[in-house]
Amino acid sequence: EFLYNGSANRDGSLRLQEARAAPAGDPPFYPPVALHFRAPFVVCTEGAVVQMRTDVQNIDLMNLSGFCRNCLSKWLHAGAKQFGAEMTYDESCEAVYGRPYKEWKAEFQTPATPEQMALYEASKPHHAAEHDAAAPSSGLPARLHSDVCCADVEPSGMRNVESAYAGSPVAIKLGVLTVSDRAHNQVYQDLSGPAILEEMGQYASKTGTWDMSVCQQRVVPDDEETIADTLQEWSESCNIILTTGGTGFSARDVTPEATKRVSHKLATGLMNKVLMDSSKLEPLAAVSRAVIGVCGHCCIINLPGRPSAVRQNLSIVMPLLGHVASQLARDVAPP
């Protein structure tokens, strides 16, 4: 085994510059070697492997290597924070697991066997130093530990609660429309609709930008007529409607078409901002067909279908919703 001194290049690649002799009792030392590789490629490849091998449990990874998928998620989260990229821990977990962690856990995680637990206890000295304060020291260099295992991360969800709107608090009458054949048929639980409510509620309470009331919430199939009729109906009682799902390229993805059908104007500038900012973290965000439209005195905003992408897009658009709602209210006659 080699023990390396590493440094990062300006382009983000990792250069392992120097090999040194291992301490007495450690594996044999081999001649010094200089390595250079692209760290992002390595991370992406490793992430793809752990996504494919759903049969390998996290406890197996801990027993073998001293780190698991959650450690990878925390490294990604810490790296994003270090380089100024906005990413919640939930989003980093989804990047590693290939789906929301709760979904992966429900489908693939199995109870630990006695054999796995025995190996886990025996391998504790090789886990992160803070994993178990009572565990004896392994004598290994600190860099060979997972330095994030069981470390705290910031709460998921809210990243930046600053608001671009500086006026008086405005009323937001919210409608949340989940568009999904499978969620409508109860093949799986709708997680994106609740994520919208959670994010919007947290933002409202932390910034005081708006007084929010939830007027409508529903799950509908991927049917253009149904979506358009619902949006038209809700626009009479809501001033902000957030849709989630149906913005892709499949034949059943028709949420943008339904939104444009009932809108008399489109907010292309705001939608461009959402797409540009979100694509900095998720390149596939650029292929979204989502739109933002105005129907009467109501703004309709298309969001992606995945909960983590919903939270990401909302973090971009929420600081501007106070301004949007205040402008929509200008032409509304008082009761």
Image: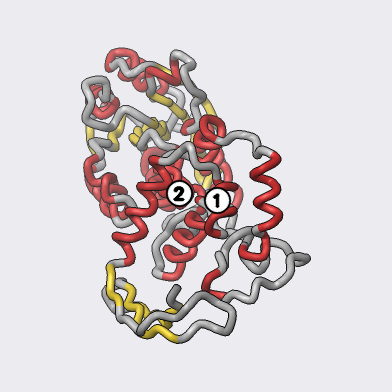
Pick the residue in front: 45 or 276.
Answer: 45
Residue 139: name its quadrant: bottom right
Measuring from the top left, give residue 24's x and y in whole percent.
Answer: 58, 84
Q: Secondary structure at mark 2?
A: helix
Q: With respect to residue 163, does 317 lie above or below?
A: above
Amino acid type at image mark 1:
Ser
User: Which one is closest to the eye, mark 2 or mark 1?
Assistant: 2
Q: Are marks 2 and 1 in contact (CB under 8 Å)?
A: yes
Question: Is residue 200 visible to the viewer in this orientation of the structure?
Answer: no
Residue 294, image x and y in percent? Answer: 30, 33
Q: Which residue was labeled with disc 2?
A: 91
Nearer the observer, 231 or 273: 273
As measured in the structure, the alpha-carbon distance from the residue carrying label 2 to the one carrying label 1 is: 8 Å
Q: Classify mark 1: helix, strand or loop.
A: loop
Q: Residue at x 50, y 51 (%)?
A: 69
- 29 vs 110, nearest the viewer: 29
Residue 48: x and y, percent? 35, 47
Where is residue 149 drawn, in percent x and y? 60, 60
Q: Is residue 40 above or below residue 195?
A: below
The label on residue 179 is: none
In the image: residue 261, left or right of residue 72: left
**Amino acid type, mark 2:** Glu
Q: Is residue 105 visible?
A: yes
Visual colour scheme: secondary structure
Q: Viewer-proximal residue, 23 or 125?
A: 23
Residue 303, quarter of picture: top left
Judging by the rendered image, the residue that carries numbered circle 1 is 156
The tag earlier along the polypeptide, 2 or 1, is 2
When the figure is inspected, residue 331 is found, relative to residue 132, above or below; the finding is above
Query: Residue at position x 50%, y 44% from top?
Result: 170
